[in-house]
Amino acid sequence: MNSKETNHSKDAKTPPSEGLGEAVLIKNGHIITASDNYIGDIFIQDETITAVGKNLTVKADKEIDATGLLVFPGAIDPHVHLEMPFMGTFSSDNYETGTRAALHGGTTTVIDFILQKQGNSLFDAYNEWSGRANNNAVGDYSFHMAVTDFNENTAKEIVDLIEKEGITSFKMFMAYKGALMIDDKQMVGLMNEVKQRGGMVTVHATNGDMIDFLIAKHRSEGKMAPIYHYLSQPEVTEAEASERFAGIAGYTGCPGYIVHLTCEGALNAVRNNNRNNQKVFVETCIQYLLLDASLYEKDFDGAKWVMSPPLREKKDQAALWAGINQGIIQVVATDHCPFKWEQKLMGKDDFSKIPNGHPAIEHRVELLYSEGVRTGKITLNKFVEVLSTNPAKIFGMHPRKGCIAPGADADIVLFDPNQKHTISAATHHMNTDYSGYEGWELTGKCKTVLLRGKVVIDDGKCLVEKGNGKYIKRSKVGGII
Ligand code: URP
Ligand code: ZN
Ligand code: ZN
């Protein structure tokens, strides 16, 4: 362990100021950030960290003994879908259940995707999503805007979304034709506009036409089981689209971010384009690191893992872990898009009707710790970097979020690295009746979670109600972190 002793305290002897909210002192924690690793104290006044150091002598209203616990910044999940209308149904976690489950698992801020309806304005969609989130979120949240219909009117809305609403990232779908997909012409137009306004584009990079061809082929041959979802989205469909996206991003100069990248071929497409000096950030998701396509061989049970892109092969997992350590993959998210089993059954006779997505918002941090840090695949610092610091930086929330330093929001996880527990739908907090990780035994658990200085989770209990979560406006970062 790198035992760096740090004292970032501005004035460790300052008593709590009159008029501020509760002053909290976290004592003797093993503080981990993206770069540091030391034993220390954290002093919080109102919602903010005001001092970090060793043996702080401050007067606090409440003291938390963190001896033996890891203490790291609240995780940020920049890829979730809450109450999203999709494939004839809605994802089953709403803002209340989804952000509460996130808090249980140490994720204090999520970024959800607003979906523009083709033919409607971006602000129509923004108002709809805000209506669902306002007064309902338990944890903090922000929005990306998915542009599904780029035209002159949408172009005009982008500036207001960035400047007034703090929505600085715009999603493009290269698949789901007829509902969400835009073509390359619209992609170039959107990237030019977003670049000019200082935003960034994010992308679901798979070749929608090729996938639709393969789906139709399998259906016409009577191949209807969940495994054909996987076989309709081979690696090349993702590699090709990632290459095309990175090339267009390089051409337009627009900063880009590939969501839920799953495979070696797509990662190599980014590598190739990086040789041309363009920068595309990459997100993978916890399931692609830990689960593989053999799960689709379980007949209809495989529907639990029907998501797009699908789970891949062991060699892809190896490429993703390496990509994280090489710094080509900057973020590990979830793509949390849960459905109940009854909803999955919509596709019992036809894999193409199984709602795509799976529940994950609650267990990303504990899974990555147990399966990534404890197995020696990544360091503790990398763990914090990909779960919290990088998403905060890439999406314009740093240094308010994603770090433990004076001035930051006091979003803090106190984590017991030795506590063993078993994942089960019977005990999780997500609004789904199955788990993609049922029976997995993990070591390491979120014990106490603070959001903006308030203890929101303590020993498995949520201490706050819906409406506790705040909307986080994000800044323009122009692709520089
Ligand atoms: O299967 C998935 N990923 N469902 C959610 C929508 C998306 O493509 O991200
Ligand atoms: Zn997607
Ligand atoms: Zn998604």
Image (cartoon, grey):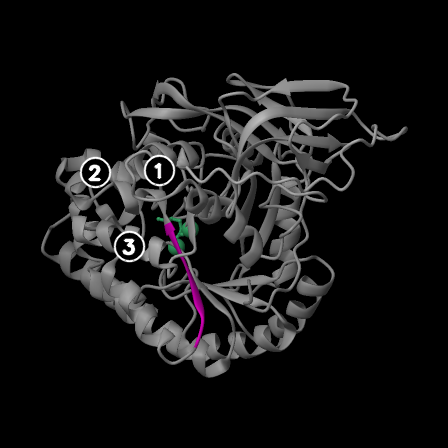
Asked if the beta carbon under badge 1 is closer than 8 A to the nearest atom of ligand 3, the reply is: no
The residue positioned 54% from the left and 20% from the top of the image is: 67
Q: Amino acid at mark 3?
A: Ala
Q: Nearer the viewer, residue 430 or 221?
A: 430
Q: Nearer the viewer, residue 118 or 339?
A: 339
**Residue 438 can be seen in this image:** yes
Query: Label 3's element?
Result: helix
**Vertical placement of residue 280 versus 25, above or below:** below
Query: Label 2's element?
Result: helix
Identify residue for label 1. Answer: 373
User: Tag count in the figure?
Assistant: 3
Identify residue for label 2. Answer: 302
- Marks 1 and 2, how far apart at CA: 28 Å
Query: Label 1's element?
Result: helix
**Residue 359 can be seen in this image:** no
Identify residue for label 3. Answer: 322
Q: Which residue range is magenta in the image?
A: 278-284
